[in-house]
Amino acid sequence: MTTTVTRPAAPTMWDPDADEIAHEALVSIRLAPTAAGQQLLEHLRSQPGVVNAWWIAADIDAMVLLRCPSMPLLHQAITDLRLRGGAETTDVHSILRPINLRAVGSC
């Protein structure tokens, strides 16, 4: 059975799924000891720049893919994870470009 989560419409003019230049980052999150996972979940659902997110069983609690139309908006989204999402620490990995996995001359 497949479960689909629908995020509520956010008050924004920017569409994170549009084919335009965007700034992306993978952000690993460790929640503060006092923060519930539900706090992070509700925050992520309300943010237009959140493309996807995963719960992680490791030294971190979650991984989030962010996509924003500008670096200042991306920085704000990361800051909001700390201030409103309950993150104690975040580790940010900026995405530069995809890696072409096709070998030259392959089918």
Image (cartoon, rainbow, N blue to C red):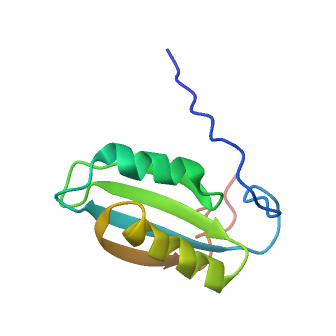
Asked whether 98 or 21 is in front, the reply is 21
Hey, which quadrant is residue 88 in on the image? bottom left
Q: Which residue is drawn at 50% across and 53% down?
A: 44
> Residue 105's spot in the image, x, y percent?
70, 64
Residue furthest to the top in view is 1
Is 28 situated left or right of 107 in this image?
A: left
Is 48 situated left or right of 84 in this image?
A: right
Q: Which residue is drawn at 22% across and 62% down?
A: 32
Asked whether 55 or 78 is in front, the reply is 78
Does residue 52 sit above or below 6 in this rendering?
A: below
Q: Which residue is drawn at 58% across and 57% down?
A: 50
Q: How many labels does the image show?
A: 0
> Residue 93's spot in the image, x, y percent?
44, 76
Does residue 3 sit above or below 49 in this rendering?
A: above
Asked whether 29 or 24 is in front, the reply is 29
Hey, which quadrant is residue 77 in on the image? bottom right
Does residue 107 sit above or below 80 in this rendering?
A: above
Residue furthest to the bottom in view is 72
> Residue 101's spot in the image, x, y percent?
58, 63
> Residue 63's spot in the image, x, y percent?
39, 58
Is 39 situated left or right of 95 in this image?
A: left
Is 13 situated left or right of 23 in this image?
A: right
Q: Which residue is drawn at 18% across and 61% down?
A: 59
